[in-house]
Amino acid sequence: MRVMNDTAAIYLDYAATTPMAPEAIEAMRPFLREEFGNPSSIHSAGGRAARALEAARERTAALAGARSPEEIAFTSGGTESDAWAIVGRILAGEARHIVTSAVEHHAVLETVEAARRIYGCEATVLPVDAQGLVDPDSLRRAIRDDTAVVSIMCANNETGTVQPIRELARIAHERGAVFHTDAVQAAGKIPIDAEESGVDLLSLSAHKFYGPKGIGALYIRRGTRLEPLQRGGGQEGGRRAGTVNVPGAVGMGAAASLALEREAVDTPRERALVELLWARLSSGIPRVRRNGHPSLRLPGILNVSVEGVDGEALLMALDRLGILVSTGSACAAGSMLPSHVLRALGTPQGYIRGSLRFSLGRGSGEEDISRVAEHLPGIVERLRALAPGKAAQPGATP
C-alpha cells in the first residue's frame, strides 16, 4: 500500500511507472541545486557534472550487462531509445526491411509504421502463439538480405511474457541482421545481459525500475552502425546531440545499482504474490483466464481476462475503492480498442475486452492481495448482472 495525494491507496500498476527510490532522489538532489554545471563545460563545475555522468553510465551499463560504459547512450526514455534503434539503423545504410512482432509496444509498432511511410521501408510482423511467444523458425524465415534491424521485445508490458532473446539474436546474426530488444519492462526485474545474449541494441527506461521519469538509455554494441536522430553537438560520444539530463542520469544510475542489489529479494517475493493473487481470483471469479506464458514471464505481472465484463468498468470500480490497476499498456490509456497484444494471442472475443493488468512491486504486500480478492469477485458479479449476456459498458456503476 502507498500514500498518494494523502490518501491510502493500493497501487498495483508498477508496470506503468514506479515510485522513485529514496536512494535515487538523494543521488539526484545535489545536481538539482548546487551542482548544476554543464558536463560539456571544461571548468571545474562542468568536470564534476561530467564525472557524475560517467559514474551513472557505469551503473547503467552494469544493469544492462554491457561490456563497456561507452556502449550506453542516455536518452529521454524508452520511446526515444526504441525509435533511435529502428530509424537509426534505417538511416545507417541502404537496407529498408524491418522485422518485428505483433505484440511489441506501440513505441516500436508506430515507429515501424512511420518508417514505412517516410522512408519506404517494408516490414514483416511476426505472429505469436497463444502464450505470446515468437517462434524462432518464423524469424528465420522472415529475415532477408536487406533486413536492417530485427526488433523483438525482451518482456511484454501487458502480459509479462519473456521472449527467447538469446536464440532470436543468434538467428538474426546468422543472417547478418542487427538485433534490437526493448527491455524497458524487463530491466530491474529479471537479469539482463546484453553482451552475453548477443543483442546489438537494447532500450531502457529509468522510471520502470524506481528511477526518475524523462531519462532512459540505449545500449549500442561496439561496432554497430547507428545514425544519430539528434544533431548539433558532440554529446554522448557524438551519437546524441543536446545537453544531457545529468540529474536524471544520476538518478537512473542509482536506481540501476539498487535494482541489481535487490533482484534476489524482489523477484521471488513478487512472483509469490502474483501466484497468490491468481489463486484467489481464479477460485473466486467464474470464467476468468490468465493471459501470457505461465512460467516464462516477469515476476510481478498478472494479466487476467473476465468473460462478459468490460475491463474499464472493472478498473473504475476498483479505483473508487482505492485499488489502482490497469487494463493494459499505460501508453494506450483511453483507447477503446481491444488490446493488440491480447488479439495477437487469440484471446476469445468474450474475454478480450475484460482484461486487467495487475503489476506488483516493492510496495506490494499480502494485504493488497487480500483487498483485491475481497472486492473484485463482487464487482464482477454486479457488472455481469447489469448486462447479462453482453459486456458491461465502461463507466457502469456496480
Image (cartoon, grey):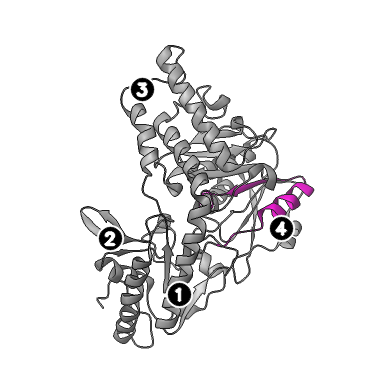
- How packed mark 2 is, by other alpha carbons closer than 10 Å (few <14, some 14-19, many 20 or more), is some
* Magenta segment: 161-187
Q: What residue type is labelled 2?
A: Ala
Whether residue 241 appears in this view of the structure is: no
- The residue tagged 4 is 139
Where residue 305 is drawn, which disc sits there? 1
What residue would you read off at disc 3?
35
Amino acid type of the residue that numbered disc 4 sits on in the rendered structure: Leu
Percent from the top left, x then y, of residue 377?
35, 80
- Tag of residue 9: 2
How far apart marks 1 and 3 lie (CA) works out to 49 Å
Question: Quadrant location of residue 325?
Answer: bottom left
Residue 165: where, in percent of width, then height?
66, 54
Q: Which residue appears farthest toward the right when viewing the image?
A: 174
Q: Where, by quadrant of the figure, is residue 236 drawn? A: top right
- Residue in the picture at 55% in, 49% down: 183
SS of the residue at dot 1?
Answer: strand
